[in-house]
Amino acid sequence: MNHSNPLGKVHLIGAGPGDPGLLTLRGAELLRRSDVVLYDGLSNTDLLVHAAAARHICVGKHGQTRIWTQSEIIDEMLTHARAGKVVSRLKGGDPAVFARTAEEVDALRAAGIEFEIVPGITAALAAGSFAGIPITHRGLASAVALVTGHEEPDKTESALDWDALARFPGTLVIYMGVTTAAVWSGALMAAGKPPGTPVALVRRCSLPDQQTVHCRLDEVADRMTPASKFRPPAIVIIGPVTGLAESMDWVTRRPLFGQTVMVSRPIDQAESMAMSLRDLGADVIIQPAIEIVPPDDWTDVDAAIADLANFDVVVFCSHNGVRYFLDRLGEIGYDMRSLAGLRIAVVGSKTAETLASYHLRADLVPTDFRAESLAADLASDVHNQRVLLVRASRGRNVLPEQLTTAGAKVTQVVAYQNRDVESADPAIVARVAAGTVDWVTVTSSASGESLHRMFGQSLHQCKLASLSPITSKALQDLGYSIAAEADPYTIESLIQSITQSQSES
Ligand code: SAH
């Protein structure tokens, strides 16, 4: 908030071409400081996380919301700024390329409102990195023209000199040219541009469903008809640089490009898995099947914490167990010294990592991350020992059973509940039903059962990737077949099993 001036301030921020990672650091910083964000249909809504506390106003998305007129957008921007708010006007691509920023700036100056303009990556430049088409090249193009394919309809005469553009010694990039493809490509050819000139059509550049079509100038109009579904946003790059995509394209060569993968892990674990999948080119949908919540009643956990000195071994079955148990320990007035003298055992490597974040080292981690192996490792020396098992409200009973058989005195406490998510996001249900989700990752038997309940029969249309034979068995019992299975039972190898299966298909 600006205290020296009763008026607010406006940031005109380039959102980049779509991939949320392509916002500038300055853009992110200013979004964080905003009270209101006015964003257009080309700005990825994922960017709004940078302005989580701000009011978000969409000023138009084709086919989804009403498109605001330019004067309505300006009025809205001025209203908030005059009320002393810090306003971010988030625009797709760069605010100074076909974005009417000059009109917005005129209005701000007339109203005496301070502003800042933050550049963004414009679509033509994004094509260089994401479609492998650099718009300049030492031997092929020493100049670029950014051209609108969509002039204002009320213009009586074209402001564009097609003769000059046809002769232009460099790359032409046509913005907003989808619906008018026949008009501008016809005008270029009529002005002498050879019909065989190589062209690339790049749609939704930098997004996971990016499409690129290479063709000739005289084929463009046929490739961009409504029936072709090559709808905006798309840019057209005209010139020999388009041929470089053959060697420079890396986006579509990624192993999971074109694959939609659902991550069904609990929300706090979903993002890191999603990131690894996105790095491989996948379009990731997150739909948790299970949610993790604190226990309804802490009595047993608190009693065990107070009694820790009387245990010999503590076993953590999952990283959530570590988090909930150790956080609770701190909350009720203890610290890590309460664990002094205890042996600590964990089932998985992730659990050991979480333990390490509390500066605790696991004494025992089975090499294959299975409960059976941990029980076997412990069996030889837990006779008559007191073992505290920190676990979820549901899960397998292998450990307590085998440890009890080995003569241990086992106390189990439920440090968190894992329960089924009640229903899936309707948009995701629709995508699964439409058969547009290629892979569903399943990381436990319980999540498999929950997914089965949420999606029913339509889940059969997806390929299932399972974390372990136990998870696979649960899915097979429900009538599913397994397309990929992790070995060892880690998220990394689960992802690898998907890429492996893709490369074989
Ligand atoms: N300021 C924006 C351009 C806005 S005009 C920029 O700098 O990129 C809207 C046009 O931009 C679309 O019709 C399309 O031609 C182009 N465009 C924007 N984002 C795009 C994307 N991700 N992929 C392809 N074209 C895109």
Image (spheres, grey):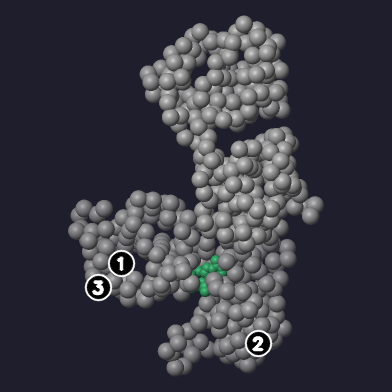
- Circle 3 residue: 110
The answer to whether 392 appears left or right of 50 in the picture is right
Which badge, 3 or 2, comes first in the chain's sequence?
3
Q: Is residue 32 above or below residue 355?
A: below
Task: Identify the secondary structure beneath mark 2.
Answer: loop
Residue depicted at 70% across the width and 67% down the height? 244
The residue type indicated by label 1 comes to Met
The residue type indicated by label 3 comes to Ala
Q: Is residue 222 above or below residue 48?
A: below
Which badge, 1 or 3, comes first in the chain's sequence?
1
Q: Is residue 355 above or below residue 489?
A: above
- Circle 2 residue: 193
The answer to whether 110 appears left or right of 269 in the picture is left
Task: Identify the secondary structure beneath mark 1.
Answer: helix
For residue 77, the mark is: 1
- Where on the picture, by quarter, is residue 72? bottom left
- Where on the picture, by quarter, is residue 411? top right
Residue depicted at 66% across the width and 83% down the height? 222
Please indicate, yes or no, whether residue 307 appears anywhere in the rendered image. yes
Assess disc 3: are there few (<14), some (14-19) or many (≥20) residues with their C-alpha within 10 Å of its C-alpha: few
For residue 29, the mark is: none
Tell me residue 75's x, y (percent).
29, 71
